[in-house]
């Protein structure tokens, strides 16, 4: 037993000696190896220290290690979110190294390099990355979606850019359509974006609908196409269409009829309610729907919440009688409180409600949330005058 212990101890000592010799002979490689392993540590403080040390000691090696770690990380790994921002520790000149990795046959590494490129551009706005634009365009053509983020921060908003983004959207990167922002579109490009509303890819239809919401200058062309898409069988697409129609202020009678019909679809009802609640000042049809809902105790809470989230200037003063009715007769304390809070948020526009609120307060026997909300509403209405 003693002999075995001696052999074991001797073996460990010999191993430590070998490691020590390697470390002394080439300490940098050993340290780099240790730091690379530390990037996957369960402790965030260790991961952060390792990333900072790698970037400081050998930035070029750090590029490779950061890309590898990002490519290998799963969403549920503790370092997944952090690994994206490790690239911010690198000097901007190393974008050239990342550009070279965009051609890596390993698609996971190429995609990670594209993400890292985007971080470097974001963190170094004053650096000239324009010489690397061709590499980014090539990466986008290969469906590395994150290349669009870097590309749009560096490149000019011209026809080549919009063409590249539209192409990528149909080749597996539908989310890049949001990078179009306010870029100028030719007639053909706008038609291509509109045609995407009928594409077989659900996500492309969704992102196209969202992208169209920022095109107010083309409202007359876009509005009817979006309204026609409200009947899309996919709820995610319909919700995106409702969001864009809301941004465009599309409240004509035909649109309101289509949106009202959506109240029967459970998965899109909330978006439809919010759309209608935000349209009462511009659409008599929407106003009628909301007033009817406020008179229905089963729907009143839902519509009160939506009205509370709408900008005060979009709330019609014609709702005041219905809100006061809820304050007087609402058996539900939450509905009474929400109704009077909504009146308060309207400010001077609800001045006509002041006498009625004061009368209701005088008859309110219990000191509850309604009383406090009513007093705050009166102060809000009268102070804002």
Image (spheres, rainbow, N blue to C red):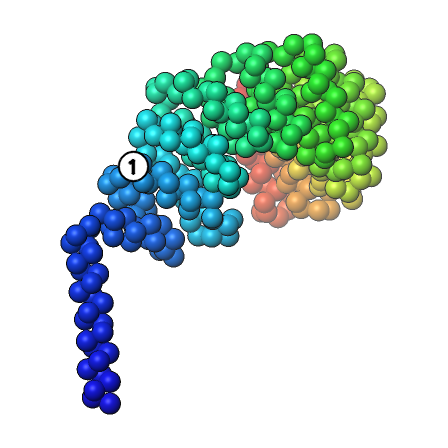
Residue at (47% x, 24% y) in the render: 135
Residue at (74% x, 26% y) in the render: 197
Q: Which residue corresponds to mark 1? A: 59
- Viewed as shown, does residue 285 lie left or right of 333? right
Residue 223 in view in this figure: yes
Residue 151 higher or lower than 39, as above or below: above
**How many residues crowd mark 1 within 10 Å: few (<14), some (14–19), many (20+)?**
some
Q: Quadrant of the N terminus?
A: bottom left
Percent across and percent down for residue 268 are: 74, 38
Q: Quadrant of the C terminus?
A: top right
Percent across and percent down for residue 362 are: 63, 38
Residue 366 higher or lower than 325, as above or below: below
Residue at (47% x, 44% y) in the render: 71
Foreground residue among 318 and 285: 285
Residue 355 in view in this figure: no
- Viewed as shown, does residue 290 lie left or right of 355? right
Foreground residue among 20 and 331: 20
- Viewed as shown, does residue 367 lie left or right of 360? left
Quarter-of-image position of residue 370:
top right
Foreground residue among 226 and 263: 226
């Amino acid at each position: 037993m003693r002999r075995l212990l001696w052999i074991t101890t001797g073996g460990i000592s010999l191993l430590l000696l070998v490691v020590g010799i390697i470390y002394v002979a080439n300490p940098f490689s050993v340290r780099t190896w240790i730091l690379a392993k530390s990037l996957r540590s369960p402790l965030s403080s260790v991961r952060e220290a390792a990333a900072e040390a790698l970037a400081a000691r050998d930035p070029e090696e750090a590029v490779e290690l950061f890309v590898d770690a990002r490519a290998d990380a799963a969403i549920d790994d503790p370092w997944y979110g952090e690994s994206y921002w490790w690239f911010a520790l690198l000097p901007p000149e190393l974008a050239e190294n990342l550009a070279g990795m965009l051609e890596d046959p390993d698609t996971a590494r190429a995609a990670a390099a594209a993400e890292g490129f985007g971080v470097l551009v974001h963190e170094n706005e004053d650096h000239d990355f324009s010489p690397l634009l061709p590499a980014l365009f090539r990466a986008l053509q290969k469906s590395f979606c994150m290349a669009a983020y870097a590309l749009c921060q560096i490149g000019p908003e011209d026809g080549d850019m919009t063409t590249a983004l539209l192409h990528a959207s149909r080749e597996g990167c539908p989310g890049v359509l949001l990078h179009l922002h306010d870029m100028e579109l030719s007639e053909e490009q706008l038609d291509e974006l509109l045609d995407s509303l009928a594409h077989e890819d659900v996500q492309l239809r969704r992102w196209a609908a969202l992208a169209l919401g920022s095109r107010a200058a083309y409202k007359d062309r876009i509005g009817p196409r979006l309204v026609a898409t409200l009947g899309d069988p996919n709820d995610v697409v319909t919700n995106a269409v409702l969001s864009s129609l809301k941004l465009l202020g599309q409240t004509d009678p035909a649109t309101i009829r289509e949106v009202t019909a959506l109240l029967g679809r459970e998965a899109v009802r909330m978006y439809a309610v919010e759309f209608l609640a935000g349209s009462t000042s511009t659409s008599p049809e929407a106003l009628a729907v909301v007033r009817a809902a406020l008179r229905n105790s089963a729907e009143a809470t839902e519509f009160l919440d939506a009205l509370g989230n709408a900008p005060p200037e979009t709330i019609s003063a014609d709702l005041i009688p219905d809100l006061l009715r809820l304050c007087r007769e609402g058996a539900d304390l939450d509905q009474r409180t929400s109704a009077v809070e909504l009146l308060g948020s309207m400010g001077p526009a609800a001045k006509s409600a002041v006498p009625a609120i004061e009368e209701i307060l005088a008859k309110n026997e219990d000191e509850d949330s309604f009383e406090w909300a009513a007093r705050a509403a009166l102060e809000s209405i009268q102070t804002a005058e």
